[in-house]
Image (spheres, grey):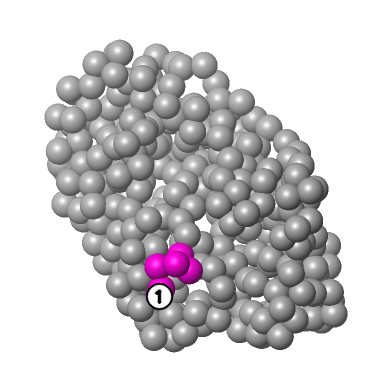
Amino acid sequence: MQYKTSDTDNAARGRLCYLSRRYRDRRTAGNKAKSDYEDILAGCGAVNLGLRRSYGRGAVATFVRNLAGVARYVLSVRRGDTVVLQYPVKKYFSLLCRVARWRGARTVALVHDLGSCRRRKLSEAQELRRLGRADVVAATNGAMAQWLEERGMPAHRLEALGLHDYLSDAEPREPQAAALTEVAYAGSLNMRKNAFLLRMAELGHALTVHLYGTLRDYDPADGTASHIHEHGFVAPDDFIAGAEGAWGLVWDGDSLDGCTGDWGGYLRVNTPHKSAFYLRAGLPLIVWSRSAIAPIVRERGLGLCVESLRDLPQALAAVTPEQYAAMRSAALAAGAEAAAGANLRALLARLGFSA
């Protein structure tokens, strides 16, 4: 879908711009999200200050092409521009912000991940110093914005996206007769990230997990996987058009009793891209009650919030057909918004750019 800026309004504010990159592939969630946001920005009339987006696995070619894109950016950015930079950028983020400031442009860091919270490759001080070079920091949600503010980021420089967008022409299939005890999980078993999937066997036969990924890390010594139906890798459009299960599960860590470890704890501040993926498929969400997206799920009726997965069988048993129909309708509506780029468009409107 294409969007048009209001030429009269936006011309007075200068150009809306972005920097395209070379990505390793289209399949990973991070690359999909960044590619989608480039497309939404382009559809809003934004100017790409780098080279045309491309994909490739060669490290040398990627380095050279991204460096060439940065050089073009340095020559192209000008006074009055607003430049949306998708964060993290593996290289050059500070340089890109400095060049924009020297030229009289402002920068918006559109945050996808905080390395200091997830993989801890940066200290909090390093991350805050790096993000502080941007004029505006657009966190993925209100909880992340609050986390940044509590650590010294001025509130007037913070924005929050809310839910991710997810561009796709696929249409969710009509509701099937799937039991409410069947849930979908997008991602392969990884004992560092989602060992809880095996522990769900402790719930007995109360739940079936449709795993859209592989059991590549599975060792029978770790527990049974009889409750998991392994679908393997499925193309995103095929998932949207035919996902099995009644819910999309957003959970990480090794525990049923809350989201634990670096990956699980990260859900306190992050909006997982898979939440938009599920909504595009019309699947209501099941999320941890202390996660950053739980307030959005509650406010918009997008699914269930539980403190522990041990509570899930009882919570599902209490859902009436009418309640589930309402949650699915809300999920479909949110998915349609994600397909239209509505979340980023709303953020751009708050920054002064109509779409």
Q: Is residue 143 visible?
A: yes
Q: Is residue 113 visible?
A: no
Picture coordinates of residue 296, whole percent (x, y) = 35, 42
Picture coordinates of residue 225, whole percent (x, y) = 30, 44
In the rendered image, the quadrant that contains the N terminus is top right
Residue at x 56%, y 63% (from the top left corner): 110
Comparing 206 with 295, the one in front is: 295
Tell me the residue that label 1 is attached to: 153
Kindly identify the amino acid type of the residue bearing the numbered disc 1: Met
Q: Is residue 81 left or right of residue 196?
A: right
Total marks shown come to 1
Which quarter of the figure has residue 133? bottom right
Instruction: Tell me the SS state at disc 1.
Output: loop
Picture coordinates of residue 183, whole percent (x, y) = 35, 33
Which quarter of the figure has residue 72? bottom right
In this rendering, the answer to whether 161 lies above or below 284 is below
Picture coordinates of residue 58, whole percent (x, y) = 75, 73
Q: Is residue 2 left or right of residue 228?
A: right
Residue at x 62%, y 42% (from the top left corner): 341
In this rendering, the answer to whether 171 lies above or below 11 is above
In the rendered image, the quadrant that contains the C terminus is top right
Q: Which residues are magenta?
A: 153-158
The answer to whether residue 211 is magenta is no
Q: Is residue 353 left or right of residue 249?
A: right
Comparing 100 with 216, the one in front is: 100
Residue at x 58%, y 40% (from the top left corner): 342
Callout 1 crowding tier (Cα within 10 Å): few <14, some 14–19, many ≥20: some
Residue at x 50%, y 79% (from the top left corner): 132
